[in-house]
Image (cartoon, coloured by chain):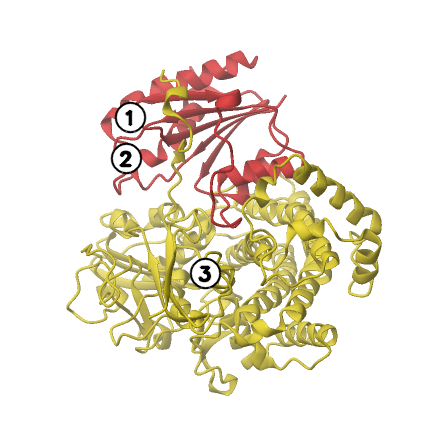
Chain colours: A yellow, B red
C-alpha cells in the first residue's frame, strides 16, 4: 500500500469536499471523493406551496443561485403541463447564459487558472516579450506592453510588502508549474482583466432578475418582469440596450482572450490531455427552450457512451421519458439509511445514517446517481460533446478553432480525443462559454423581435389540481445536468429531490461499487510531491466542484478570543 | 458618500442566516436614504464584487463563531477585523473575505469595515431563527443604525 493523502477541504465555499488518494510509485492508485456536509435541504420544502420552492432552493448554494430557481419552476411547470410564454423563455434564457458566462470566466481565471499559472514567476516576465507573444495570439486591446508593465508593477507592490493577498498559499514554484514567466505574466494580466469583465455578466443577471445576487423575477408559469418599452421601473428599451452593450464586451473578451488563453495554457501542458479522463459516459440535457412547451432548444443535449460521439442518444424535450426514467440514486456508500437498492428521485429518501469514514463502506454525504445504472460525467465537456455529436455548428467551430490554436502552439496536431482529460474539461468550458455568449446575443434579439410584434406576455397563471402529480425540471447548468424532482399532492409539496451536477461528478461508489467521475479521473494521476498535491487539485478543480449548502459562518479562528469585545 | 450594510448567511440553516434577517428587518422598518445601500448577500461570493466596489464604509452582519456564549453580539472594527487571509489550502476558496481581498487587488476596497457578529444558537435545517436569536434582532438592528449614525447618516423609522 502506498502513501495516503487527504485533502480536506478542497474548497471552503463549496460545502466541504474531501478527497482521499492512495499514492503508489508517484501515481494515484485509489481515490475517494467525500461530501462532508449533509445536504438535506429538500426536507424544508415538504408541505410548502410549490410556487415558493424556487425562492427557497436558490438559497441551497452560494455559487449557483439562479440555476436552482430555474430547475425548480421547470419541475412544477412539468407537473402541471404548464406552458411558458415566449418572452419568459427568452428572459430566462438570457439569465441562464449570462450566469453561465459569469461562472465560466470566474471558474477559469479566479478559481482554477492558478493551478497552472505561477503568479510569482510572472514577476520575472518581460513586458515587451509578453506583448510580442500576445500579439501573435490575439487582437485584444488589453494586450499592450504598457498594460503588462502596469500589472507587473502592481504585483511587485503586493509581493514587496509581503502581502500576496488573494494569491496567498498558491503552489508557486511547484515542479508541475511549466509556463514561462511571459506566459505567466500574460495570464495574470488576464486574471485581473477578467475581474472587470465578469461584472458585465453579473449586471445582466441582476437587471433581468430584478435584484442581485439572488434573482427575484422567477415565477411558476413565467417571469414577473413586466415589459413596457417606455417605463423606467420595468424592462425598458434603455435597459435592454445597456444589456446589449455588456454582451458585446463579454463577447470580445471570451473570443479574443478566454478561448486563446485556454488554447495556449493547454499547449504548454499537452501531457495533461492524457490525464484525468475517468468516466467517459457523458450526460447533458438540452437547454434554452425556443417554444412555450419546451420541445425545441437552441442547445441540444443527450447521452454519449464510452466517449464515442456516434453513440449519442438525444434527450429531446422537457420531461423526456428517456431522461426521466433513467435516473436513480444509490446510498450504499453514502451516510443515509439504505437497503432498498438505488431509488428513482420521485421515491428518493434522505434519512441520515452517519458511520464515520469507511473506505469500503459509507464515506460521503453525497448520494451516487446513475443513468440507466451507470455513473455519468456531467458538465461543460459533456455538453460540448453532446452538441458536437449533433453537429451543432457554433460548437464545432469553436472546438476546432481551439484545438487548432493549441496544436499550432504545441507544434503537433491535437485530436478531438484529447478532450477526454483534465485540460480537456477546461477547453470544453471555454468552448461552451463562446457558444453561450453567441446565444445570449441571439436570445436578446429574439426577445426584442417578439416584443416588437406586440407580445408583452410574460406569465401564465398556474392552477393546481386535486390529487397527486409528479414533475421533473432539468437545466443544463454551468456545472452540468441539474434536475429537480417534485411530487405535489393537493397543491402542497410531498417530496422534493435535487440531483445536482456535483452529485453526479463527486459521487461515491454506487450500488455496484463502481467509482464516480472524480474518483475514476484521479486514477494514475502523477503526484510529484504528496505534501503539495497540486496535480490532484488540478483534476478535481477541472470539474468546477460545488457541493451545495454553503455555510458561511464568519470565523475568528487564529485570533485570541480576548481581543473580541463582547457587547 | 456610499455606505453599505451587507447581511450574509444561509437562511436555510436557522441562525446561520441571521445577517440576512437583520438586513430584511432594516429594509422593512426604516426608509433608507440614497447613500445607504442594504444588500442581502446570502452565501454568494464573486457576484457581490460589483455591489461592494468603492464603498466608503462597509458594515457586515453575519453569524460568528467567536467562542462566546450563544447569542453573544460582537462588534469588530479597525484592526480587530480578522485578517482576510488565514491558512488556506489553495487560492481557490472564494467567499466574502476573498471578495474583499480582490477589492484590495483592484484598488476598490471599502474605506472602512465594521463587522457585527452574532454567536448562533442553532444551525439546524430550518428557515426560522432560534427564539433566542430572533429576540435579539431588534438589538442588532439598533446597533447597525447606531453604526450608520456614527458614520453621519441618521435613519428614519417607517411610520
Q: Based on the displayed image, in which of its 4 quarters is residue A258 positioned?
A: bottom right
The residue carrying pointer 1 sits among few (fewer than 14), some (14 to 19) or many (20 or more) residues within 10 Å by Cα, namely some
Marks 3 and 2, how far apart at CA: 44 Å
Marks 1 and 3, how far apart at CA: 47 Å
Query: Does mark 1 fall on the same chain as mark 2?
Result: yes
**How many marks on residues?**
3
Q: Are marks 2 and 1 in contact (CB under 8 Å)?
A: yes
Q: Based on the displayed image, in which of its 4 quarters is residue A496 positioned?
A: bottom left
Instruction: Judge left or right: residue A184 versus residue B150.
Output: right
Read off the residue under disc 2: B128
User: Mark 1: which secondary structure?
Assistant: helix
Read off the residue under disc 1: B134
Q: Nearer the viewer, mark 1 or mark 3?
A: 3
Q: Nearest the camera: B149 or A139? A: A139
Q: Quadrant of the N terminus of chain A?
A: bottom left
Residue A530, numbered label = 3
From the top left corner, tell me how far across and down residue A442 is, in percent. Answer: 64, 62
Label 3 resides on the chain identified as A
User: Mark 2: which secondary structure?
Assistant: loop
The structure residue drawn at horizontal position 55% and vertical position 39%, both measured from the top left corner, is B99
The structure residue drawn at horizontal position 71% and vertical position 41%, both measured from the top left corner, is A156
Q: Is residue A244 among what the camera can see?
A: no
The residue carrying pointer 3 sits among few (fewer than 14), some (14 to 19) or many (20 or more) residues within 10 Å by Cα, namely some
From the top left corner, tell me how far across and down residue A464 is, in percent. Answer: 28, 55
User: Mark 3: which secondary structure?
Assistant: loop
The residue carrying pointer 2 sits among few (fewer than 14), some (14 to 19) or many (20 or more) residues within 10 Å by Cα, namely some
Amino acid at each position: 500500500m502506498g502513501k495516503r493523502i487527504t485533502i480536506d477541504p478542497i474548497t471552503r465555499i463549496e460545502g466541504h469536499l474531501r478527497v482521499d488518494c492512495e499514492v503508489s510509485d508517484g501515481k494515484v492508485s485509489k481515490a475517494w471523493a467525500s461530501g462532508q456536509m449533509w445536504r438535506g435541504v429538500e426536507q424544508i420544502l415538504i408541505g410548502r406551496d410549490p410556487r415558493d420552492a424556487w425562492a427557497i432552493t436558490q438559497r441551497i448554494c452560494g455559487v449557483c443561485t439562479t440555476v436552482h430557481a430555474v430547475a425548480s419552476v421547470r419541475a412544477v411547470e412539468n407537473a402541471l403541463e404548464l406552458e411558458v410564454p415566449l418572452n419568459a423563455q427568452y428572459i430566462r434564457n438570457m439569465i441562464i447564459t449570462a450566469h453561465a458566462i459569469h461562472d465560466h470566466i470566474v471558474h477559469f481565471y479566479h478559481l482554477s487558472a492558478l493551478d497552472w499559472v505561477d503568479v510569482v514567476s510572472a514577476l520575472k516576465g518581460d513586458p515587451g516579450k509578453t506583448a510580442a507573444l500576445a500579439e501573435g495570439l490575439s487582437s485584444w486591446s488589453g494586450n499592450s506592453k504598457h498594460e503588462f508593465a502596469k500589472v507587473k508593477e502592481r504585483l511587485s507592490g503586493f509581493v514587496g510588502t509581503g502581502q500576496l493577498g488573494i494569491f496567498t498559499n498558491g503552489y508557486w514554484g511547484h515542479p508541475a508549474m511549466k509556463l514561462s514567466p511571459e506566459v505567466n505574466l500574460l495570464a495574470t494580466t488576464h486574471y485581473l482583466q477578467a475581474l472587470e469583465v465578469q461584472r458585465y455578466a453579473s449586471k445582466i443577471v441582476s437587471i433581468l432578475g430584478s435584484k442581485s445576487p439572488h434573482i427575484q423575477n422567477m415565477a411558476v408559469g413565467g417571469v414577473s418582469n413586466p415589459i413596457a418599452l417606455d417605463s423606467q421601473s420595468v424592462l425598458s428599451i434603455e435597459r435592454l440596450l445597456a444589456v446589449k452593450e455588456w454582451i458585446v464586451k463579454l463577447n470580445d473578451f471570451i473570443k479574443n482572450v478566454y478561448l486563446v488563453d485556454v488554447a495556449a495554457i493547454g499547449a504548454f501542458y499537452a501531457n495533461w490531455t492524457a490525464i484525468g479522463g475517468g468516466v467517459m459516459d457523458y450526460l447533458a440535457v438540452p437547454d434554452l427552450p425556443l417554444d412555450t412547451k419546451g420541445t425545441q432548444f437552441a442547445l441540444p443535449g443527450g447521452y454519449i457512451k464510452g466517449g464515442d460521439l456516434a453513440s449519442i442518444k438525444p434527450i429531446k424535450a422537457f420531461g423526456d421519458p428517456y431522461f426521466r426514467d433513467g435516473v436513480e440514486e444509490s446510498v450504499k456508500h453514502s451516510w443515509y439509511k439504505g437497503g432498498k437498492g438505488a431509488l428513482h428521485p420521485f421515491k428518493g429518501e434522505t434519512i441520515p445514517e452517519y458511520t464515520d469514514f469507511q473506505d469500503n463502506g459509507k464515506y460521503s454525504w453525497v448520494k451516487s446517481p446513475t443513468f440507466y445504472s451507470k455513473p455519468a460525467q456531467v458538465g461543460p465537456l459533456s455538453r460540448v460533446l453532446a452538441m458536437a455529436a449533433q453537429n451543432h455548428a457554433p460548437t464545432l467551430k469553436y472546438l476546432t478553432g481551439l484545438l487548432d490554436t493549441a496544436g499550432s502552439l504545441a507544434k503537433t496536431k491535437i485530436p478531438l480525443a484529447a478532450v477526454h482529460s483534465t485540460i480537456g474539461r477546461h477547453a470544453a468550458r471555454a468552448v461552451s462559454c463562446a457558444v453561450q455568449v453567441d446565444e445570449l446575443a441571439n436570445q436578446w434579439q429574439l426577445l426584442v423581435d417578439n416584443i416588437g410584434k406586440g407580445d408583452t406576455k410574460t406569465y401564465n397563471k398556474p392552477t393546481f389540481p386535486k390529487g397527486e402529480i409528479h414533475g421533473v425540471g432539468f437545466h443544463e447548468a454551468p456545472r452540468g445536468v441539474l434536475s429537480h424532482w417534485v411530487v405535489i399532492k393537493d397543491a402542497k409539496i410531498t417530496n422534493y429531490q435535487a440531483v445536482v451536477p456535483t452529485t453526479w461528478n463527486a459521487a461515491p461508489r454506487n450500488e455496484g461499487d463502481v467509482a464516480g467521475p472524480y474518483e475514476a479521473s484521479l486514477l494514475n494521476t502523477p503526484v510529484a510531491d504528496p505534501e503539495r498535491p497540486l496535480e490532484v487539485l488540478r483534476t478535481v478543480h477541472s470539474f468546477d466542484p460545488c457541493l451545495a449548502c454553503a455555510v458561511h459562518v464568519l470565523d475568528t479562528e487564529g485570533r485570541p478570543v480576548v481581543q473580541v469585545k463582547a457587547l | 458618500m456610499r455606505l453599505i450594510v451587507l447581511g450574509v448567511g444561509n437562511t436555510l440553516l436557522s441562525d446561520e442566516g441571521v445577517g440576512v434577517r437583520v438586513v430584511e428587518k432594516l429594509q422593512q422598518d426604516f426608509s433608507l436614504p440614497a447613500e445607504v445601500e442594504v444588500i442581502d448577500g446570502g452565501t454568494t461570493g464573486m457576484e457581490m464584487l460589483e455591489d461592494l466596489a468603492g464603498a466608503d464604509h462597509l458594515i457586515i452582519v453575519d453569524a460568528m463563531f467567536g467562542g462566546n456564549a450563544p447569542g453573544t453580539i460582537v462588534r469588530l472594527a479597525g484592526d480587530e477585523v480578522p485578517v482576510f487571509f488565514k491558512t488556506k489550502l489553495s487560492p481557490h476558496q472564494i467567499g466574502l473575505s476573498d471578495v474583499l481581498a480582490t477589492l484590495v487587488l483592484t484598488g476598490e476596497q471599502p474605506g472602512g469595515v465594521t463587522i457585527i457578529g452574532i454567536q448562533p444558537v442553532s444551525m439546524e435545517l430550518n428557515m426560522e431563527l432560534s427564539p433566542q436569536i430572533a429576540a435579539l434582532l431588534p438589538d442588532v438592528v439598533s446597533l447597525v443604525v447606531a453604526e450608520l449614525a456614527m458614520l453621519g447618516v441618521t435613519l428614519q423609522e417607517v411610520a
